[in-house]
Image (cartoon, rainbow, N blue to C red):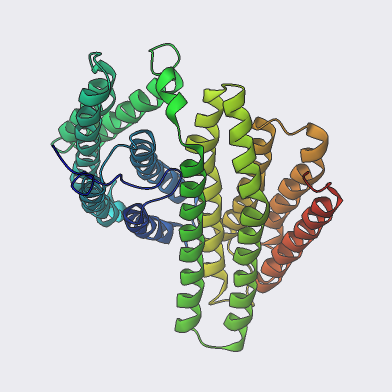
Amino acid sequence: MRTAAQRPRPAREPGRVHWMELFFDLVFVAFIGQLAHGIHGDPGWPEFGTYVLLFFPAWWAWVNIVSVINLLPGLTSRVLGLSMVAAMAAAGLMAAAAPHAFGERAWAFSLANAAMRGLLLVLWLHEHRKLSPEQPWRIWMYNGGTSLLWFIAVFLPLHAAVILWAVAIAVEVGMIAASRWIGAQRNLGGINLEHATERLGLFVVIVLGESIFTIVSELAQDWHPGPALASALGFMIVALLGWAFFQYGMDVLASGLGQLRKREDFSGILQTTLFMPFALVLGVTSIAAAIATAIPAPNTLLPPGAAVALGGGLALFYGTNAIVSLRFGAPLRSVLPWGIPAVVAALVLVPLGGKLPAAVVLALAVALLLLLTVQAEANARRRPDPP
């Protein structure tokens, strides 16, 4: 019999994120950085479309890894560590293939996704054998079937491979959406909300950090007063987004998920932790790309594509936060007064990009965020202190 000292340690404390999970996240930030280069400058709809279409498979792979760690707290530290290292290797290959995933590196992008699903299959089957006597058909379909589709895509021409990519992701998303009807709903009752909240918050920290890194890198390449001003304005934009998310958004996220659990609204939990944050992160990375475009040429008009990235990114950020708040049960009268003006004002920046210098457009974005921050601070001060 094993002594207490010999028993494998749990992967993490309840509700806490393991260090190896954060280590794994760094690879996904590298992936985002690789993709974001495609929307620097003056991207058109093909560039934006490519960015979104390649970003979602990466986001969905991250979501699946997070879900495994969350729903399988019995994983030991060693198993978790080895799994994260293996997942990092797959994510690293995905990131390296991303710039040409719709070209000569499509096979590598397919292989990386197949490996990620294969790893998830092994983890789920390993734990399922200990936890449930049922046949694991959902696991085989969700991870095994999709892994096979991604693997077959390795050997197919691009047009056929893309179809299999879409089918694989549709199967996974469809099974999540239909969890109540296929008997997986009861598994969602084991979601650790503290871990889910902290995991998402830390990922946003890293994404915002990548945005700061982009700003610093652009300024280092063009060390002049104009780019310095644009960099300062860009830094203020990212800092204010971080302030909004961490000063207000995290509390809303934690309390909102708790309310959804009390109502046993597991579809709401899935929507607000798996799907909606994708739009928020997409918005932040688009904003960073626009700032990077403005820094080298602050006195010229912002290119149309960069203006769309800036205004559209801000609209996505605040629009997503508004929708999440409503999904958590916040009344319309408390969300609409800031949600609608924020989205409308953000979208107004798009046409202004073609009429005003880039630095002025960044300054207007800063002014908008400052107004929203002041409003949020005023609202927070008016709320009664909790008993």
Query: On the image, which quarter does residue 130 sit in?
Result: top left
Residue 42 visible to an observer of this rendering: no
In this rendering, would 252 be left or right of 172? right
Q: In the figure, 235 relative to 282: above or below?
A: below
User: Residue 200: percent from the left, percent from the top?
Assistant: 49, 47
In this rendering, would 301 be left or right of 49? right
249 vs 372, nearest the viewer:
249
Q: Residue furthest bottom?
A: 224
160 vs 141, nearest the viewer:
141
The count of marks equals 0
Residue 345 visible to an observer of this rendering: yes
Q: In the figure, 321 relative to 326: above or below?
A: below
Which residue is depicted at the point 64% across and 80% down?
A: 229
User: Residue 368: percent from the left, percent from the top?
Assistant: 75, 60
Q: In the figure, 306 relative to 316: above or below?
A: below
User: Residue 384: percent from the left, percent from the top?
Assistant: 84, 46
In this rendering, would 195 be left or right of 320? left
379 vs 318, nearest the viewer:
379
Quarter in which the C terminus is drawn: top right
307 vs 144, nearest the viewer:
144
Which residue is depicted at the point 66% across and 47% down?
A: 318
Which residue is depicted at the point 71% across and 46% down?
A: 343
Which residue is depicted at the point 52% across and 24% down?
A: 266
User: Residue 350: percent from the left, percent from the top?
Assistant: 67, 55
Q: Residue furthest right?
A: 382
Quarter in which the N terminus is drawn: top left
Query: On the image, which quarter does residue 358 sit in?
Result: bottom right
